[in-house]
Image (cartoon, rainbow, N blue to C red):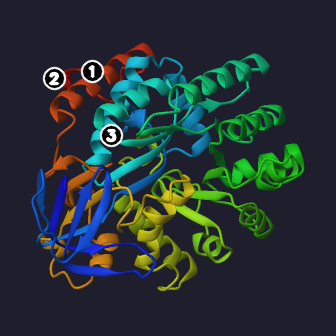
Amino acid sequence: MDVIIKGGTVVTMDRGREILKNFSIGVEDGRIAEVAEKIPGEADFVIDARGKVVIPGLINTHTHAAMTLFRGSADDLPLHRWLQEEIWPVEAKLKPQHVYAGSLLACLEMLTSGITCFNDMYFYLDEVARAAEEAGMRAVLSYPLLDVAGEEQGRELLRLAEEGLRRFGGSELVRVFVGPHAPYTCSEELLLRAKELAERYGTGIHIHVSETEEEVERFVREKGMRPVEYLESIGFLSERVLMAHGVHLSRREQELVSARGAKISHNPVSNMKLGAGIAPVADYIKAGITVALGTDGAASNNVLDLFQEMKACALLQKVSRQDAAALPAWEALRLATVNGALALGMPELGVIRPGAVADIAVVDMRRPHLTPLSNPVSHLVYAARGEDVTDVLVNGRVVVQDGRCRTLDAEEVERFAVREAVELFESAGRGDRLPLAEEVP
């Protein structure tokens, strides 16, 4: 065996909802070879999981990784003011090294909190891919497509998107989706060209949809229909589509999403922070929609921690419906694992069973806030935090050991990110914003 994880409590997330106490996992050639009480023989790498819970690697289905550089710089504003007044003016000054630095920092944060795969939409796709590959992390990337500045803008961005699809077609860790930004920033022609590009390359589509009531109301005024109804009317909806947010879907829109097999990435913490509303996730699940979890970017969260998202997701459904059983812990954990894999078209992820890809996280339960360990799934959703993760495998490779990232130098990444953030904000004339220049190492 390449790796053996010994003696942990294994939450398989397989169909039977099995929790296997004092079990071991054998990993070979990037796959889970065996799940058993004892695995004979030796391994190149052994992880002692006694007192720990072993889960499939968590899957972040919507983020903007490089926006870690914006962390804490634009808080307490509604979405459209936040974008137009704070985010877009700084993004206009982005350079490749900014995106690389911010993405490295995001990979470090996500890996050490048990996230093994992320779905990203951002500029300079090659730099995000470079960071993910250096970190040894699985990534699904899309270049944001929009044509608010005219047809030429849309054509150029489509060209860049297709370049990415060609360049990373054979990558083991990096895949590329087509990423039309949103129905309100893309013309009908651009949306349909994005769909055609995704079909030609056999890949997915990543798009923001119905994040705020204001967005939906403005869309109805301009188009005479709601965003999902519009996407259906132009023939855009399909099983390839992963919609970020989807906070405000009518019953009819829910039926359309379900019928077409489109998926939703629910981002509860970002939605709360931006005052976007509460997505009726329990209704979506009941309607047969595959719902997964995302963090959104660190500018609107402000952390990349799926444990927080699981808890927020479950609690929001309970309080908004005044029903403590509205979304149980099992379902929340499923959204962060199995459903994340399905949303990204990678069903070989998100479970622990022989033959599955060995993307695995180990969570230490020997902490005051996780004691006593009466219910592993309850603890994972309602009590655990990203810093409780001790070990992480991606594609069978140990990338985090005893809480330390083995692929990236944490101090070096943090210093690099701070320097590039200072340069970015100064170039945008926002030197009064964090980070403070005197804090640069």
Q: Are marks 2 and 3 in contact (CB under 8 Å)?
A: no
Residue 211 coordinates in the image, percent (x, y):
63, 52
Residue 166 coordinates in the image, percent (x, y):
57, 26
Helix, strand, or loop for circle 1? Answer: helix
Check residue 441 in the rendering and tell me which mark sits there, or answer none: 2
Query: Which residue is under mark 1?
Result: 419
Assign the C terminus to one quadrant of the image: top left
Looking at the image, which residue sits at the far front?
41
Q: How far separated are the C-alphas under marks 2 and 3? A: 20 Å
**Would you say residue 436 is visible in this rendering?**
no
Q: Relative to 219, is 193 above or below?
A: above
Query: Which residue is under mark 3?
Result: 107
Residue 316 coordinates in the image, percent (x, y):
49, 71
Helix, strand, or loop for circle 3? Answer: helix
Snapshot quadrant of residue 361: bottom left
Check residue 319 in the rendering and tell me which mark sits there, or answer none: none
Task: Determine the residue positioned at 54% across, 83% down.
Answer: 322
The amino acid at mark 3 is Cys
Looking at the image, which residue sits at the far right?
224
Q: Residues within 10 Å of mark 3 (few under 14, many from 20)?
A: many
Q: Residues within 10 Å of mark 1 (few under 14, many from 20)?
A: some
Residue 39 coordinates in the image, percent (x, y):
16, 70
Mark 2 or 3: the one toward you: 3
Q: Are marks 1 and 2 in contact (CB under 8 Å)?
A: yes
Helix, strand, or loop for circle 2? Answer: loop
The amino acid at mark 2 is Pro
Instruction: Say whether residue 33 is left or right of residue 285.
Output: left
Instruction: Say whether residue 18 is left or right of residue 255.
Output: left
The amino acid at mark 1 is Arg
Task: Identify which residue, 237 or 224, lies in the foreground.
Answer: 237
Assign the N terminus to one quadrant of the image: bottom left
Task: Identify which residue, 345 or 250, lies in the foreground.
Answer: 345
